[in-house]
Image (cartoon, rainbow, N blue to C red):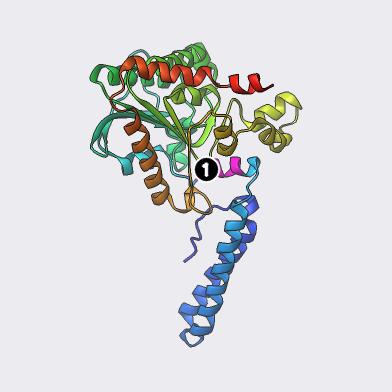
Amino acid sequence: MPDSTRTYLDFERPIAELDAKIEELEKLARSNSAEGPDVAEEIGKLRQKSADQLATLYSKLDPWRKTQVARHPDRPHFRDYRKALIEDFEELCGDRRYGEDHAIVGGVGRFRGRPVVVLGHEKGHDTQTRLKHNFGMARPEGYRKAIRLMDLAEKFKLPVLTFVDTAGAYPGVGAEERGQSEAIARCTERCLTLGMPLVSVITGEGGSGGAVALASANTVIMLEHSIYSVISPEGCASILWRDSARAKDAAAAMKITAQDLIGLKIIDRIVTEPVGGAHRDAQTTIRHVGDALDAAVGALDGLPADKLKKKRRDRFYAIGRMQAGEG
C-alpha cells in the first residue's frame, strides 16, 4: 500500500500522482468488494507503471537531483545506523572543555562482534530532534568530543567508524568565538594521526570541513545518491555568480556525486541504494552499509599503526596529484 505520509521531491511528482491513484483505488476496493477483481487489475498496472517510472527517474539523476535525494528528510540517519549495526552501544558525551554537542553523537559498542568506537552526525527526524541536534551542524565542542573519542580508541586499540551527514559546521557567532576552525583542523589532524583503522561512510550530505573532520579516513565509503563537497551548491553559486538560484549549475560543476568522486579517487567505494533512494528501503540500505564497513575494517585488520598512518597520509596526498600530472 502506498505510504500517504511519504515526502516526494519535486521531480518525483509523476510518481506521487500515480501513488495517489493507487491509494484511491485501494480504498475503493476495500469499500466495494464486488468491484474487487477489476480494481485489483488496475492497481497492479499502476503499481508496475509507478515502479518503472521510478526506476527510469533514478537511473539518470543529475547532480542537483542527487543533492535533493541526499537531503531527503526520510533518509536513514546516524541513529538508524547505530541502532541496526551497533550492539551494546554506550554513548559518551561532552568534550571535557565546554559542554555537550548533540550534533555529533558517539560512543563505544560492538559492530558484528567487534569492539569499536563509533561516531557520526545526527540531523534528527522531527522538529524537536532536529532542533536538539542542530540539524547535524556541529559546534567546536562536537569536534573536540570526536577527538576525545579517537584518543579513547587509540588507548584501547579499537577501530573507529564514522558516519558523515552534515551540511557543514555550524556558522554561528558563538561557535566562531569558541574556535570553530581550530577545532575542525584539530579533528582532521587527529583522524590523520590515528594509529587504528578508521573507516568513514557518507550517508547523506558531506559538507565542507564539517564533513572532512570526520572523514579523513583510511577508507571512505559513499552511498550512491549522497554528495560530498567543499561547499554547498547554493553557497558556491552565491560566491561565483552572486545568485543562489544557480545551485543546479554549481552542483554539476563541482563534481559532488559519488560517481564523480570515485573517478577522482577521493572515495573508495560506492554502496548501491534501493531504487528510489535509501529512504524507500532503509533496512536494505543499512544492511548494505554494514557489509561495506565490515569488508573495509577487515581489510585493515592487523596493520601496524605506522602503516595505517602512512596509507592514510598517502591517500590524501595523492588527491589532485594524478589530475595535475595528467594536465
Q: Position of residue 234 (x, y in %)?
A: 66, 32
Q: Amino acid at mark 1?
A: Glu
Q: Position of residue 187 (x, y in %)?
A: 43, 17
Q: Which residue occupies the extreme front position in the image?
A: 326
Query: 316 or 163, which is in the foreground?
Result: 316
Residue ID at (76%, 27%): 241
Splitting the image into 4 quarters, where does residue 104 fall? top left
Q: Secondary structure at mark 1?
A: loop
Query: 181 or 96, which is in the foreground?
Result: 181
Q: Which quarter of the rendering shows the C terminus?
A: top right
Residue ID at (73%, 35%): 246
Residue ID at (40%, 37%): 78
Query: 217 or 7, which is in the foreground?
Result: 217
Main secondary structure along the magenta-highlighted residues: helix
Left or right of 206, for residue 57 = right
Q: Where does the magenta region start and end?
A: 66-73
Q: Position of residue 168 (x, y in %)?
A: 53, 27
Q: Position of residue 287 (x, y in %)?
A: 37, 46
| Residue 121 sits above or below residue 35 on the image | above
Does the magenta run of residues contain 72? yes
Splitting the image into 4 quarters, where does residue 96 fall? top left
- Can you identify the residue that label 1 sits on? 224
Left or right of 156, for residue 95 = right
Left or right of 116, for residue 233 = right
Query: 100 or 194, which is in the foreground?
Result: 194
| Residue 215 sits above or below residue 257 on the image | above
Does the magenta run of residues contain 190? no
Splitting the image into 4 quarters, where does residue 71 fall? top right
